[in-house]
């Protein structure tokens, strides 16, 4: 090539590079660090597609029911994008149970004291919703800092509420940016009804998500979605106050966790690292910045994520007992919660207009028997 002459392709490439650099410099909403390593595990948990057998309940009336709670009488509660807490009676009839408003209602959990429900409104904080429709904001700040992303809650028998603030850097609408950025700013919080105040139990969490208690309440579990693990913080005994790993190397990013009537924890595992494209983007902080700077690229990368998965875990030692999946996301793509009640599993999803239901009687105990379809 003669000196001083750029060919057309070179000029185009240079223009694109300048345009990208300017856009990233001006608009990039994240300050990324490298993504946590993804545990191997494909071989440990080959696809079984057992979730394909689920039945859809409340189809059409439920807009992205993220979390599901079933009470002792078999009534099911879920909060939907239209700002309602909806209830399905054991006889299958649905009702709009309590109105909160907004689009950020996530975790639902019972408040034993008075039949009220605790609801995490990602955008407002921890709420209490009563049967008569009264809504009380229990906590919107903690130790002087705003609760940015209230996600899941559980009430202990002494009335203390443990709940998560997924990240302090992004709101619910931008949750995916938090994963791209990969900084650990989530927190496990606790609300004390006696003082009416919230405090931080554990900080620095990689997207603080589901929260649960074992039957003896000797510890509280909080899931760290970004890091494929759940931690426990001891509440009783000589290790009270100490945090340790409860379960790690999960074959997905743990979302909600709930103790079932079968005595096991059930955890929803988001398949946020399932796409080769997303793994390519995650490889360099520069590619993360480029994708985060262009909404269309961001939506495209999210859309390449497929599949849904849940795991059954022992409450004593965090051992993974069984994993069920819909490996291609044929029925549901994005299971965010799983609840066991009387031998049935119920699934919530941010990408569905129904709650899934699957009888465990249809699931082999020994998954070696399971045939992938
Ligand atoms: C279902 O149960 C609820 C609560 O007991 C009751 O109010 C409702 O009328 C019942 N619906 C039907 C169709 O039986």
Image: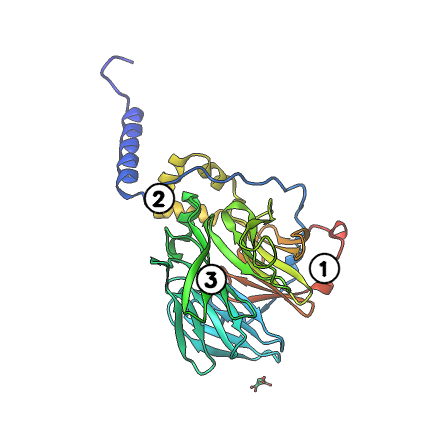
Position of residue 85 relative to residue 18, above or below, is below
Q: Quadrant of residue 233?
A: bottom right
Circles 1 and 2 in contact, beta carbons < 8 Å:
no
Element under disc 3: strand
Residue lying at 73% horizontally and 64% vertically, measured from the top left: 361
Give the spatial CA distance, label 1 vs label 3.
36 Å
Circles 1 and 3 in contact, beta carbons < 8 Å:
no
What is the x, y in percent for residue 72? 62, 75
Give the spatial CA distance, label 1 vs label 2.
42 Å
Give the spatial CA distance, label 3 vs label 2.
28 Å
What is the x, y in percent for residue 270? 54, 52
Element under disc 2: loop
Left/right of residue 364 with respect to residue 199 in the rendered view: right
Residue wearing tag 3: 190
What is the x, y in percent for residue 118? 48, 70
Position of residue 162 relative to residue 113, above or below, is above
Residue wearing tag 1: 363
Crowdedness near tag 2: few (<14), some (14–19) or many (≥20) residues, C-alpha within 10 Å: many
Crowdedness near tag 3: few (<14), some (14–19) or many (≥20) residues, C-alpha within 10 Å: many
Mark 1 or mark 3, earlier in chain: 3
* Dot label at residue 30: 2
Crowdedness near tag 1: few (<14), some (14–19) or many (≥20) residues, C-alpha within 10 Å: some
Q: How is the image coloured?
A: rainbow
Circles 3 and 2 in contact, beta carbons < 8 Å:
no
Quadrant containing the N terminus in the rendered view: top left
Q: Ligand 1 sits in which quadrant?
A: bottom right
Q: Tell which residue pokes out farthest to the front in this image.
A: 238
Residue lying at 29% horizontally and 34% vertically, measured from the top left: 21
Q: Tell which residue pokes out farthest to the top in this image.
A: 2
């Amino acid at each position: 090539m003669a000196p001083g002459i750029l060919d057309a392709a070179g000029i185009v490439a240079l223009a694109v590079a300048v345009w990208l650099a300017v856009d990233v410099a001006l608009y990039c909403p994240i300050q990324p660090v490298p993504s946590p390593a993804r545990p191997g595990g494909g071989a440990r948990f080959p696809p079984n597609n057992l979730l394909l057998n689920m039945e859809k309940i409340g189809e059409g009336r439920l807009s992205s029911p993220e979390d599901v709670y079933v009470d002792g009488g078999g009534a099911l509660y879920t909060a939907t994008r239209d700002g309602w807490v909806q209830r399905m009676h054991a006889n299958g009839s649905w009702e709009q149970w309590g109105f909160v408003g907004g689009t950020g209602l996530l975790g639902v959990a019972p408040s034993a004291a008075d039949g009220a429900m605790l609801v995490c409104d990602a955008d407002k904080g921890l709420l209490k919703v009563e049967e008569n429709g009264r809504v009380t904001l229990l906590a919107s700040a903690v130790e002087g800092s705003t609760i940015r992303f209230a996600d899941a809650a559980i009430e202990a028998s002494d009335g203390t509420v443990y709940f998560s603030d997924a990240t302090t850097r992004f709101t619910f609408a931008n949750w995916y940016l938090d994963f791209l950025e990969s900084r650990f700013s989530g927190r496990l919080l606790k609300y004390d009804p006696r003082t009416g105040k919230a405090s931080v139990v554990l900080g620095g969490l990689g997207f603080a998500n589901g929260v649960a208690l074992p039957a003896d309440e000797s510890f509280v579990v909080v899931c760290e979605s970004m890091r494929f693990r759940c931690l426990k913080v001891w509440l009783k005994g000589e290790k009270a106050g100490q945090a340790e790993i409860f379960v790690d190397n999960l074959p997905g990013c743990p979302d909600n966790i709930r103790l079932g009537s079968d005595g096991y924890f059930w955890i929803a595992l988001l398949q946020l690292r399932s796409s080769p494209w997303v793994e390519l983007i995650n490889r360099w902080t520069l590619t993360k910045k480029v994708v985060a700077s262009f909404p269309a690229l961001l939506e495209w990368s999210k859309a390449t994520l497929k599949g849904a998965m849940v795991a059954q875990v022992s409450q004593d030692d965090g051992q993974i007992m069984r994993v069920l999946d819909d490996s291609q996301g044929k029925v549901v793509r994005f299971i965010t919660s799983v609840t066991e009640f009387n031998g049935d599993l119920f699934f919530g999803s941010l990408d569905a207009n129904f709650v899934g239901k699957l009888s465990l009687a249809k699931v082999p105990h020994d998954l070696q028997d399971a045939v992938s379809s």
